Amino acid sequence: MGYAKSAEVREMLKIKELTIGIGDKDIVRDINLSLKKAEIMVLFGPNGSGKSTLIKAILGFSGYDIKKGSIEFNSKNLNNLSIDKRVALGIGIMYQHPPKIRGVRLRQLAEFLSSDKERIAHLAEELSLESHLDREINMGFSGGEMKRAELFQILLQCPSLIFLDEPESGVDIENISIMGKALNEYLKESRAQALIITHTGYILDYVDVSTSSVMIDGHISCSGHPRKIFKAIQEHGYDKCRECKCLSNF
Amino acid sequence: MSKQLLKEFNEEDKKAITSSGMDDTESTRSASFLQADDKIHFSHALSKGVEILAIEDAVSKYSEVSDYYGRAFKTLNKDFPTDTKGGYFIRVKKGHKIDLPIQSCLFLKDSGFKQQVHNIVIIEEDADVHLITGCSASHSAKEAYHLGISEFFIDKRASLNFTMIHSWKEDVAVKPMSVALVQEGGSFVSNYICLKPVKEITMYPTAVLEGENSRASFNSLLLTHPGSFQDIGSRVIFKAKNSSAEIVARAVSLGGKAIARGHFKAEAADIKAHLECRGLIISDKGVIHAIPELETEFRDVEMSHEAAIGKISREEIEYLCSRGFSHDQAQSIIIRGFMDIGILALPDMLKKEIKDLEEKTLEGSF
């Protein structure tokens, strides 16, 4: 029992004093952030505050320089690993704007991510993507179709840490519900942890989010209960976050 | 035991010949022709309505063949070499729709051999056929040369889907010259695939749309290896109204030089044409030069082109890496995707075969 408990509270993702630069400019400055097993965090923040930059740097995308600090996942330092090596540790990402790739079909990626053809077929059906499997990835997909295809790949990949960058943007209400349910089910079953970037907050209706933080100008300015923080942002806007260290205590 | 067309060739040559699309068992073909250097190895048809024989035999057997000889080039006031030896004569009789493709192969075997052939293909009224033709070279054919002259005559409402696979090697120079004449309601589709190294290829096949409502389509997949030079174009001349054409090319340079030309010339009104050329440069030493040309004397034409050349997008590579592919795997998937056979207008029965052939050829190329 004691072992199980200590695993539960262990920090899976641990970011320490991290500064990320793009070119000469520091976009994320000196942040600390951690996720425990099965913890789901929402990251709020205005455009350009550094949310996507943080995710891309954790994944190891080029152009995002770690100037200071460290990123650890499952007690492994990620700082100098290639993207695929990080992904192999169990990290997955759902893109906000995934690229279109000519001649590469969704099925190709699906079959790389999972050898279980039945699962691929079942999940494609659940996310209404059966007719997209043999199409070139994201070519001519609507906003919602792209997002469903992203989620589809994530769920086939079965990561234990998921980054979701604006999962609901461009998705109609009906599909948010389908996606939200599928995502929540996976997170519950796998006890994966997730970091979700959202503007609209719709995702809060479908996913059992445990905590949230607000990112302003490259800093984490506030952390707390997701509903309370979201409500405060809706009422006061992000400007208040600049003035106030913790809106959720309003 | 299944048939073995290529039993007189050694294993290495068999492999070279089948890599350019020949079905050794012939079970999926309606006729076959093979010429190695200047020797005709076989030439026979299995389907009613198809004739296939060596060009010299056709000229002596049928008086009308000499009327066709050189006619397509004369239409363009273009000279062509006449010191040829061999080549095929294919005729599909009026009204015959041939289900299985006809296959042919022009093979280079001896070191330093200069193969010069003249082919004539006649598709009579309302006939419909697929022709898959391969050109390749034996390992022993050092510094060899191939000149292929082809004339295609597509009669009223007839259709020819012509797929040519070039499977050469780094010391072979090649010069195909071809002209297709397409009559009213006729269709000429040319699919061209060149994925192996070659010393030099220069070709500018031309389709002349002579009849109303005729169409031409040229689709090419080119992989240019270091040291290779490929000057490859497609030209369509519109001589009748309501005719249409499309040129689609994909060129990937691994370090060699590729010139991708395309030319539409409208000599009639009410025509429609679109040209699309995309190039991908993998190596710093690679060169791709896309030259699209549109030419018209008429107002009522719709001609367009798009050309784009670039390197592999970092975003696409990193996207695939974020799904777990290594950088090299991601690059290979993107190149293969770029060279998707989907851009070719292949008949269904050849799609899988050509895809497998492409996979096999690309293996280890990058």
Image (cartoon, coloured by chain):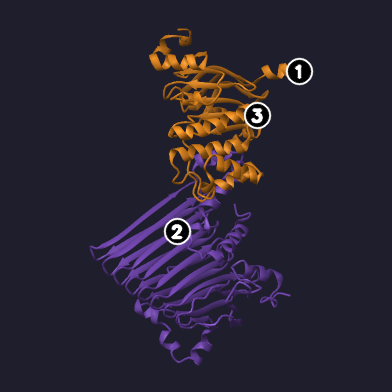
Chain colours: A orange, B purple
Marking on residue A190: 3
For disc 3, the chain is A
| Residue at the spot 74% in from the left edge and 75% down from the top edge | B1
For disc 1, the chain is A
Check the image and name the residue furthest to the top. A250
In front of the other: label 3 or label 2?
Answer: 3
Above or below, B276 relative to B117: above
SS at circle 1: helix
According to the image, label 2 marks what residue?
Answer: B249
Residue B123, x across and y down, in percent: 45, 79
Marking on residue A3: 1
Residue type, numbered disc 1: Tyr
Camera-side residue: A122 or B160?
A122
Marking on residue A155: none
In front of the other: label 1 or label 2?
Answer: 1
In front of the other: label 1 or label 3?
Answer: 3
Camera-side residue: B27 or B284?
B27
Calculate the distance from the C-alpha at mark 1 to the C-alpha at mark 2: 62 Å
